[in-house]
Amino acid sequence: MTPPSTDRSTRAPVVSGAAALLLGAGFVAVSVAYNRGSLVPPLDDVYIHLQYARQLGDGEPLRYQPGAEITTGASSLLWMVLLGAAHAVGFDGRWLLAVAVAGGVVGVALAAAFTSAAATRLGGRAAGWWAGLLTALCGPLLWGGASGMEVGLLAALVTGTLLSYLRERPRFRWTPVVAALLALTRPEGFLVAAAFTAAMAWTLLRSCPGTPPGELSWLRWQRGFPSGRAAARGLLVAAPVVVFAAQLLLFRVLTGTSQANGVLAKSWLHTGFLHQPLEIADHVQRNVAALLASLAGLSGQDVLAPLALVAVLGVAALAARRERTLAVALGGGLVLVVAAVATLTTAMWQDLRYLQPFLPLLLLLVVLGAGLVPHRVARGGLLAVVLLFTVAATPAWALRLGQQASAMREGPVSVAQWIAGNVPPGDVVAVNDVGAAAWFGGHRTVDLVGLTTNGMAAPSLNGPGTLYEALRALPPDDRPQWFAVFDRWGGVPVADLGRAGLLGTEPVITFGLAGPARPISASAPQTCQIDRSCDRVSIWRADWFTADSAQAPDAPVPGRIVDHLNVGDTADEAAHGWTTDPPVLGVQPDSVLDRSVVAPGRLVADSGRHVVGGETFTLGGTVPGRPVTLTGRIGAGPARPGERTRVVAVDVDGRPAGEWTLPDAQPWAQASFTVPGELVTGDRVTVTTRPVAPLLAPYPDYRSYGWWASR
C-alpha cells in the first residue's frame, strides 16, 4: 500500500472552510431578508428537533411534550442531544433555532475543510483545492446546513471519519469514535460508519506486526499485538456498530419497537396493508433511478453538475492507487446510503435532504475520477465545467432557501401562532405538520402522520378510515378537539376525515400562501402545482358526535349478537384475523370512511375497506351444529350488464356455503347470510368471501364496513 501524502503546507482546507462559512452566512442572510429580519427554517421538521431538544433540556428526553409518552420522532439522536444541551445552558426560543442554524453552517464549513484535506492526502494539492472549493460552493449542501437540520453535522462527521481514517491508519484511535458519533446522527450515517468499521478491521488484520503478506487470522493478529491490546483495539473498532445497536435496543425497551417513527411513517417497507416484496422492490428501484438521475445532473434538479458521473471513476482511481480498501468502503457506503434512502416514500422530497450530507464524498470522488484523465489541460477543463455548473446553481439554492422559509412563515408558523392565541388552554390539536404547531402553539398535539404520536403511522398509511379508528380509540381526554390540516396533500388524506363529520361543517379559518406557489419538491403532486390546495391549511373544530355510532347494526339482526368485527380498525382486524385475498397482486384494501342516516334521527359514521376479490375473517361465539347468521354492513354499486361484481361465493372453514348477492347501496346497506348448522363445527367460524369463478374477472368489488355474528 502506498503511504498517503503527508504534505500539509497547502492552505486549501482553511480557504475551503472559510469560503463555506461565508457562503453559509450569506444563505442565512438571504433567508432573513425574505422574512423581514426574522430567522425561519425552510422545513417544519426543524421545529420537531427543537421541540425534542427543549424537552431534553428540561429533563424529559424523548418526550415531545411535557408528560407525553416516549416517542422516537427525532430523526437524529445526536443532533437532538446537542440542541438539548444548548437549551439546558440557556438557549431557548429563536436563540435555540439560531444555534441549530449556526451549527449547521459550521458543520458544512468543517465538511469542506475535511474534504479538502482528505483529497490532498489522496490526490495531491490540486485535488485538495478542487474538492474543497466544489464542496464549499455546493448549493444543496449549503441549503441543508442553513436549514437548521442535522445536515451540517452529518456532513462534518462523514468527512471527518474519512480524514481520520486516512490520518490514523493502521492504528485507529479516534476514527472509531468519530464513526460512532456518525452512526448516532442518522441511520444513513450508520451505513457509512459500518463501511469504515469493516475497512478499519481489514486494515488492522493486514497490518499487524509479524504477519506475512496475505496471511489473515485472529491468532496472527493476536501474535502481532499483546492480547489485551488486541482485544481493546478490536472492541474500539466495533464501537460504531455497538452504539447503533444500543440505540436500537434503547428504542425497543422504551417504545416496544426498534424502528424509529420516521421509518414507520415514511418507508415503503411499512406502507399499506399488503406488502408484496416485488412491488416494494419496484418502488425502491424507481427511487434509485430518480436519485441517481438527480445526482448525475440529468433530472432537472440542480443537485450536482451533469459531469458528476465522473464520481464512478473516482472509485476506480482509488483502486488503481492501491487504495482498494478505501475504494470499497466509500463506494459500498454510498451505494448502501442510496439504497436505504430509496426505500423511503419521501426519498425525493425536500431537495434531497437525505443525500445532502454525503455530497462531499461524491465531489471528492469526482475530483479523483478526473485525475484519470491523462492530459493536464483536459483534466482542468473537465473540473472547470463542474465548477461552472456548481457556481451557476448556488445562488438559486439561496433563493430557494429564502422562499421556502417565507412559505413556512406564512403556513405552519402562522397556523401555530393562531392556535396559541385562539385555542382554549388544555384543548388537544391534531395536525399533520407537528413541528411549528407544538413549538409555538403551547397545546398538546396529536401527530396524524405518526412521527411524535406512537401508533398513528400505520393507520394513517392505510387511509382515512383506519386513521379515524385510531383517533376514536384514544381516551376521551386525549381526543383532539381541533384539527389543523392541509386541504389536500400528497401524503396522508387527513382532509377525508370530514367524510365522517369529524371536521364539522365549515373550517374556523383557512390559511393560504400569498406568495408564488412553492411545491415541497419537484415530485410534489401535480394538483398542488395547479390549484395550490397543498398551500392551504384549514383549522376545524372537531365534532365527535358520531364517534361510537357504528358499533351497533343499523337494524335488528336475527337472534343474539355474539361477536362483531369492525373493519377498518386495525386492532380489531388483527383480533379477528381479517385479511383480503385480491386476485390481482398490488390491489391494496385501502380504508374508507363514510356516514349515513340509517334511521330517522340516527346518523352513523363508520370506517371500512375497499375489497376487490374477497376477504377472510374469524368470528367467535358460535355453537357447533347450530346455524349462525352473518350480518354485514356493505357498500356495493350496481352491477353493469353481464357482470356479477356484487355476487360472492361464501366459504365457512374452507367448505362452500353458497353464493350471496351483495346489496346495491351507497354508501352501504345491511344484509345477512345464514350459515347452515352442519357447517358450524366449533366455537368460532372462519368466513371467506371470494369470486364465484376464481381468478376470472369480473371480480367482486365492494366496501366492507363491519360484520356481526348472531345465533
Image (cartoon, rainbow, N blue to C red):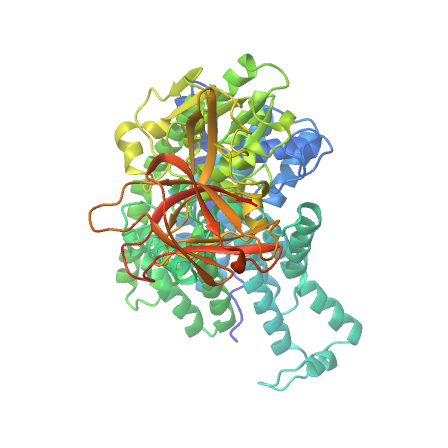
User: Of all residues shown, which one is farthest toward the left?
Assistant: 641
Instruction: Residue 467 in the image: state x and y as whole percent.
Output: 50, 37
Residue 208, relative to residue 288: is it above or below? below
In the image shown, does 504 or 617 lie closer to the viewer? 617
Instruction: Residue 688 in the image: state x and y as whole percent.
Output: 46, 56
Residue 193, relative to residue 465: is it above or below? below
Instruction: Residue 158 in the image: state x and y as whole percent.
Output: 53, 53
Tell me if 432 is positioned left or right of 194 in this view.
left
Q: Name the residue located 36 percent from the left edge and 64 percent from the top edge.
A: 312
* Residue 408 seen in render: no
Residue 226, relative to residue 643: is it above or below? below
Instruction: Residue 264 in the image: state x and y as whole percent.
Output: 53, 47
Q: Name the residue located 74 percent from the left edge and 82 percent from the top edge.
A: 223
Residue 544, relative to residue 616: is it above or below? above
In the image shown, does 73 or 110 lie closer to the viewer? 73
In the image shown, does 260 or 446 lie closer to the viewer? 446
Q: Name the residue located 34 percent from the left edge and 36 percent from the top edge.
A: 665
Q: Quadrant of the C terminus?
A: top right
Tell me which corner region of the image, top left, top right, bottom left or bottom right, holds residue 552.
Answer: top right
Tell me which corner region of the image, top left, top right, bottom left or bottom right, holds residue 681.
Answer: bottom right
Tell me if 98 is positioned left or right of 692 in this view.
right
